[in-house]
Amino acid sequence: MSLAEQRFRTKLSRQSKTLAAAVAEYQRRYAMPPPKGFDKWWEFTQQYEVIMIDEYDGLMRDLQPFYDLKGGGVEIRRRIAAVAGLASIDLVRVRGGVLSTISVQADGYVDSEVSARAKGLKSILGRFAKDLPDMDFPVNAKAEGRVIVPWEKRLMQFNSTTDNNTHMQPLASFRPDWKGEGNVWDAWRRTCPPDSTARKLFSSIRSGMHILSSLTSPQFTFSPNTPYHDQSFCDEPHLHYMQGHFFSDWRTLGELYPVMSPARASGFADIKIPSHYYYGSTSRYTYGWDAEKGEIMDVDKDELNKIFWRGATTGGGNEPAGFAGMYQRHRASSLTLLTFSPKLGALGNSGADVDASGGLRHLSISYATLNKEIMDIAFMKATNPAQYPGGLENLMKDHRFAEGIPLGGHWKYKYLLDLDGMSYSGRFMAFLASDSVPVKSTVYEEFYGEWIEPWLHYIPLSAGYEEIYNIYSYFSGISSEVVEQVYDASGDLESAGNSSSTRTIKHIPGAPDGDAKLHRIALAGKQWKRTIGRKLDMEAYVYRLALEWARLCSDDREEMSMNNN
């Protein structure tokens, strides 16, 4: 937490304070001049007090493969036109400073009905569209990522001296779903280098039960970041069974087509844009939103010291079938049904172990006891239950279901678990805006990734969730009610041979000032949302993306650079 705060303060302090400094920093980072219109973008950031001026490395990484394409803007525009004819791809169009949205059908028919994601991007562009050149943004209507380019094709694209489209597969026969003809994992593992484990093994020899067994092991360490940063599916392919996006029903594109999506998992080539859930205001995704009054209201809270989550059984598709029980939400739900005992840090067969002076070395508490005390995790809706092994009956038997609650009902809990669904979690911004602390596990990167700091603004959680109990015990300790149950289950500590010990341990305290530290994270996240995660900051990001995209798509990129204004 201390290092996180230092990193964030350093990042804030180094942001450019003048246009000249911003131009120099851009040239230092990217070895080229900023795009045309950068000066107007700078004026926008100053008018609306945008804090993050220089942190756009993730955006530039998204766009770099398109710079590597031979054929320049002509080729990119050709690919935009081609991908626009696919199912679930919409266009946001700028013509003469005026915005429109269209959906181009496979037969060439142009439909004005488009997805909420395309409408969301159009709304974000609205404030500055008048200053943009003509261009098209292909927008993914699905939550899942769409573009996976194999390692060999990326290499060919980078090294090719001829037009790249000579090696491309035609899209005329592209079918939007797999229908048993391949799957996301088989396509994804081909993004790995040829000598990687994922390329050598079609599937891992490790079973799902082996992965689940990791939950029985004590986890006394904490993750520095989310699984997006910490996991390598190329090196450890068995981990892909734990993530539902590898089982999506929707067929991915195996060529470098430009598709803009709200989140990007490692190995995908989609271009990140802010989620329409974050930019719009709805009662399901916006903190404090009052639909009747049409405004955000202050929300009263009544803090319960529990880890809370509610959601649907979404999280992946069914290609191939039989793995739904391993998806990220189902694994979290399974935590609440465990009954054996973890060890809780230096504090987790129920019983306590003390040293000669009566000091506590560790406390073993059954999961059943812990879960009742600190967890409230349940599904509230069964979505596509037929894909779960054994169908709805087994799904209901294997997992806890409870009544759904509105978003506003979350704010009375101190810890809010934030898990991926079919893609990213659309509730993260709302969780940050609250007085609760998000505990986030995700395999996705989003537009704000370089603007936010784990362990300062939220608590990152590993993909296996093994450390979640020690996260709780660090900040909140273990209550006297739980300790009493341990004594009742194992008898007085004297019965275990500790004659010097008595029943003086009333509760297990967390870290010194643990609750205050937890509250500090909640406040830091709330402040971040108010100052860096605003709608205006999303607009600044998309404005910058639009200028970069205009240059990429132009016939003369030098002319579309700032030094030619």
Image (cartoon, rainbow, N blue to C red):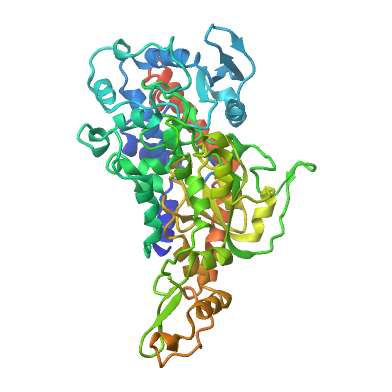
Question: How many numbered discs sit on the rendered protein?
Answer: 0
Which of the two residues, 435 or 390, is positioned nearer the viewer here?
Answer: 390
The percent position of residue 306, horizontal first and vertical second, equals 58, 63
Q: Residue at x 54, y 70 (%)?
A: 516
Note whether residue 47 is visible: no
Q: Is residue 240 above or below residue 565?
A: below
Which of the two residues, 116 or 387, is positioned nearer the viewer here?
Answer: 387
Q: Is residue 415 above or below residue 557?
A: below
The percent position of residue 436, horizontal first and vertical second, equals 59, 58
The percent position of residue 334, horizontal first and vertical second, equals 50, 52
| The residue positioned farthest toward the right in the image shown | 292
Q: Residue at x 41, y 93 (%)?
A: 500
Displayed quadrant of residue 78: top left
Q: Which quarter of the rendering shows the N terminus?
A: bottom left
The percent position of residue 416, horizontal first and vertical second, equals 57, 55
| The residue positioned farthest toward the left in the image shown | 195
Note whether residue 166 is visible: yes
Q: Which quarter of the rendering shows the C terminus?
A: top left
| The residue positioned farthest toward the bottom in the image shown | 500
- Left or right: residue 100 versus residue 259 is right
Which of the two residues, 441 or 250, is positioned nearer the viewer here?
Answer: 250
Q: Residue at x 35, y 89 (%)?
A: 356
Displayed quadrant of residue 116: top right
